[in-house]
Amino acid sequence: MSTDANEIIERRAVISGAGQSDVGRRLYRDPLELTLDACLAAIDDAGLTTAEIDGIATYPGPIATPPGFSGAGIVDVQDALRLEIGWWTGGIELPGQLGSVINACLAVASGLATHVLCFRSVWEGSAQGKEGRSAVMPGGSSGGAFRASGFMEWTLPFAAPSAAIWIAMMAERHFHEYGTTREQLAQIALNARKNAGVNPKAIYRDPMTMDDYLGIRMISSPLCLYDCDIPCDGATALIVSRAETAPDLRKTPIQVEAVGTALRGRPSWDQFDDLTTMACRDAGAQLWTRTDLTPRDVELAEMYDGFSFITMAWIEAMGFCGKGESGPFVEGGQRIARDGELPLNTHGGQLSAGRLHGYGFLHEACVQLWGEAGERQVPGDPEVGVACAGGGPLAGALLLTRRR
């Protein structure tokens, strides 16, 4: 496939600013307030004003179930900031949580907008209340009476309302097919905790050992508690701008080099054609057809870890190792350390920093490429990074660069 810049439409888009609210386990703050904190920070970071924002994109929009999954919608933010917009989008049926950002790239590339405010906010920590970690999924322990429909009709009768159970099934199949071990899987969580230790916004920063990991309670074999992400409160925002606006921006923007959004398998958590992988397989493969860069050019990877095995699937899908080889690839943790060949989830990911969904990973990739990550900054002035989000039947990826 040709990779002429004029044909790769996403290269007409750049990320010009990023912002984040306070992040905490349970902040008990108004979710819209958190959202606006992040949005205003991102606008200021780009050197723009609210009058210059003419597009909005979000995931998933205002939904009530599960509790805390969405902190604000487009109407809330547009009204609160008094924005005059020419384009907007939001919804849950997107290629992963970063689908809204990818849509924004296409909007500015086509001329529908010049500067798009993209945001994602959650308050799942506060929604769970003060009685410890509990389920917020429909049919879970906090859901009360619930009439199942769609996919849930086939999982709730088997007491399987949680993605932890569905992803565990995929992990078990990978273990069976390729000999993957819990000690290998542990490296995703151990690496996340080590990186979170130098992230002042991370939820859990205390050191974790292999013994700690192997000794914690199981959730759904082979996934233990430390393989599961942490509900929290917080908001993240980014500004997607037309590339030609770069001279007017506060700092050198980050180029969107290529995106991946493909879905060629069945859109199902449990009926995908290959249960050792997920939709990330298709999104990753598509991304590399849209650039002449290769996986070897990538200097940092911020890859979704709603559960640790999802990151393993992304490592394979993005071509950083062969199919079935993610276990040996991460074994020992050296390759994925901040000073390794593929620095991974440098902010602590969702396993330790908190579940801010795909936006948290994209925010970290941008901060790293701008050289603004402080104590957790990847050495060597990285110029190429990836941000990937989604698990199961949802996936989207962006390849970012400073050097083009």
Image (spheres, rainbow, N blue to C red):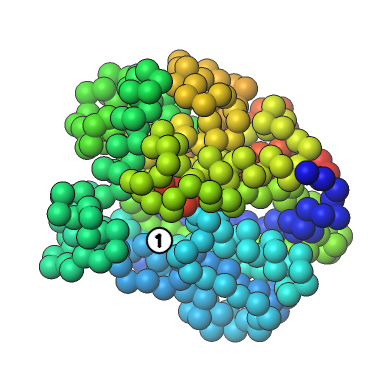
Q: Residues within 10 Å of mark 1 (few under 14, many from 20)?
A: many
Q: Position of residue 283 (x, y in %)?
A: 58, 46
- The residue that label 1 is drawn on is 122
**Which residue sits at x=53%, y=49%?**
264
Give residue 312's position: percent from left, percent from top: 46, 31
Question: What residue do we see at 40% from left, 61% from top?
Answer: 122
Q: Is residue 390 above or below residue 194?
A: below
The reply, left or right, for residue 213 in relation to residue 385 is left
Front-most of 48 and 243? Answer: 243
**Observer-nearest of 326 and 190:** 326
Can you see residue 192? no
Residue sitting nearer the eye, 30 or 216: 216
Task: Decide if residue 264 is on the left or right side of residue 151.
Answer: right
| Vertical comparison of 206 with 363: above or below | above
Q: Position of residue 123 (x, y in %)?
A: 36, 61
SS for callout 1: strand
Mark 1 residue type: Val
Q: Residue at x 59, y 41 (%)?
A: 284
Quadrant placement of the C terminus = top right
> Looking at the figure, which quarter contains the N terminus?
top right
Q: Is residue 8 above or below residue 295?
A: below
Residue 307, position as x, y percentages in the image: 37, 40
- Count the marks: how many? 1
Left or right position of 395 against 70? right
Q: Is residue 63 above or below residue 325?
A: below
**Res 234 visible:** yes
For the point 47% across and 74% down, the residue is 73
